[in-house]
Image (cartoon, rainbow, N blue to C red):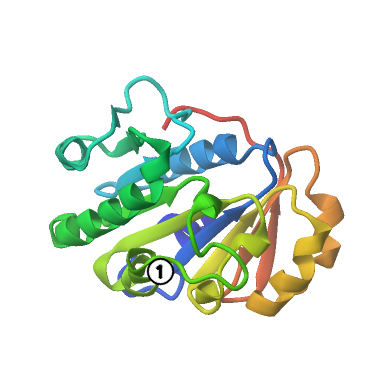
Amino acid sequence: MSTIRKMLLPDRNGSHSLSTAFCARSGSGKTTLLTHLVGEARRDEAFKETRFVYVSIKQEHLFGEDVPVVSTIEDLLKAMQKQPIVTFYPKDAGYYEEDIDDIIESMFSISDDVDGGIVLMIDDANVLKGFDSRGQPSPSVKKLTIAGRSKGIRGVYILHRISNLPRLMNGNLSGMVLLSISSMDLPYSKKITGIELDSLLPELVDYKWAYVDLITENIHRYNPVEAKNP
């Protein structure tokens, strides 16, 4: 199975179809990398019927002008009927958590009708309540994390720090995508994943990135990417 499929494919039965975490400092190239990976997925036959939903509190994306931007659940569901990628911008950043919960519940309500599954990418998930080492995320986020695989919904949480991951993610992630990370995150990363990342830290510079396979406990290293429209 390719790395792209391991990190993004919403396979209802696959061992690698749990949630994926993108962890990197601000300005390290997360958006560029995510855009590239979604583009690669779109060129893979396995993702032919998959729907990608990108939610951004900062109201920015690099997917190109052809990707619709919506701000209501009704418009999101309508756009998903025809578009492989849809971007959601909250009308009010103060209600981001409520929007995320509503989107998750909506994805569950339509999941049986989306043959290729859904990839739900939540940017700046670290601003949501419960996203810290001792936190308890909302019931809807828990639902996505624990039950998403069975419904063909792949959660992708985009965060600034590995330590933003709540304990709920322990055992409910199948992979992490890492760019520049803080050395302060290494002990917590070891605690929740069981994988030693100290040797990786000095390599994640100049937009280099890595995929940490939490199922096989292998680390795959990659050179910087150039974003292309999916």
- In this rendering, does residue 74 appear at all? yes
Along the line of sight, which residue is nearer the eye, 87 or 35? 87
| Residue labelled with disc 1 | 145
In the picture shown, does residue 104 fall above or below 95? Answer: below
In the picture shown, does residue 124 fall above or below 134? Answer: above
Task: Give the x, y percent position of residue 225.
Answer: 64, 36
Task: Give the x, y percent position of residue 210.
Answer: 68, 54
Along the line of sight, which residue is nearer the eye, 166 or 173? 166
Q: Is residue 2 left or right of residue 176?
A: left
Task: Give the x, y percent position of residue 223.
Answer: 71, 43
Task: Give the x, y percent position of residue 47.
Answer: 33, 50
The quadrant in which residue 192 appears is bottom right
Residue at 74% x, 48% y is 180
Q: Residues within 10 Å of mark 1 (few under 14, many from 20)?
A: many
Q: Residue furthest top?
A: 65
Residue at 37% x, 60% y is 154
The quadrant in which residue 89 appears is top left
- In this rendering, does residue 10 appear at all? no
Q: Is residue 144 left or right of residue 159?
A: left
Residue at 24% x, 48% y is 49
Check disc 1 and give the amino acid type.
Answer: Thr
Q: Is residue 54 left or right of residue 115?
A: right
Residue at 31% x, 61% y is 153
In the picture shown, does residue 65 fall above or below 67? Answer: above
In the picture shown, does residue 68 fall above or below 77? Answer: above
